[in-house]
Amino acid sequence: MINHHVALIYAMVLGAAADGSLADSELETIRDIVEHLPIFADFEHGNLAQVASACTDLLTVEDGIDAVIAQIKENLPSKLRATAYALACDVVAADGEATQEELRYLELLRHEIEVDRLTAAAVERGAGARYARI
């Protein structure tokens, strides 16, 4: 059983790992989010590396991504589902390019945690605007 902090971090780590690599910009984004967002105010920040490692370990088993997404869905309060999707979008956008694998992950996450399409579109547009580059 994981808590809402871990579920949110798992959503971000999956976004970072979806393309098969963890870019420094994605890891830095996760770190910044955990350090600054109010939802993580009572999270023990020293546990971030351990939580991220546990998530990547789960990905190595057969159907790992499905298992992790199931854990996210089961342990995330419904009022934090759009938050999880938004954080995953921020991590995907952090390196300036969303790969097909990352976009497929976001679509899978959106469907599994039941974020409606209109909310998802707004979240995606916001992430794109925040991480835009010239």
Image (cartoon, grey):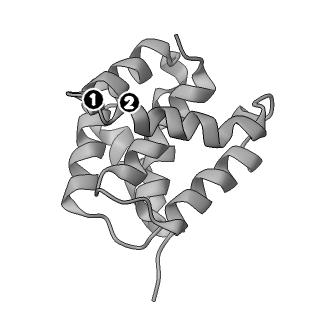
Say which residue appears at 32% left-offset and 41% top-offset. 118
Callout 1 secondary element:
loop
Q: Compared with residue 127, is residue 38 higher up or lower down, i.e. above or below?
A: above
Q: What label sits on residue 36 in the rendered view?
A: none
**For this view, does 132 lie left or right of residue 120?**
right
Q: Position of residue 66 (x, y in %)?
A: 26, 26
Q: Residue 5 falls in which quadrant of the image?
A: top right
Q: Amino acid at mark 1?
A: Val
Seen from the viewer's position, the closer of residues 60 and 64 is: 60
96 left or right, relative to 43: left
Nearer to the camera, 3 or 129: 3
Question: Residue 47: x and y, percent?
Answer: 70, 35
Judged from the image, the secondary structure of the residue bearing numbered disc 2 is: helix
Q: CA distance from mark 2 to mark 1?
A: 6 Å
Mark 2 surroundings: few (<14), some (14-19) or many (≥20) residues within 10 A? some
Residue under label 2, please give it. 58
The answer to whether residue 113 of the structure is visible from this angle is no
Q: Residue at x 24, y 36 (%)?
A: 108
| Residue 7 x %, y % | 51, 27
Quadrant showing the C terminus: bottom left
Residue type highlighted by circle 2: Leu
- Specify whether residue 108 is in view: yes
User: Along the line of sight, which residue is nearer the eye, 95 or 19?
Assistant: 19
CB within 8 Å, label 2 to label 1: yes
Residue indicated by mark 1: 61
Categorize mark 1 by other alpha carbons within 10 Å: few (<14), some (14-19), many (20+): few
Q: Position of residue 54 (x, y in %)?
A: 50, 32
- Residue at left 27%, top 44%? 105
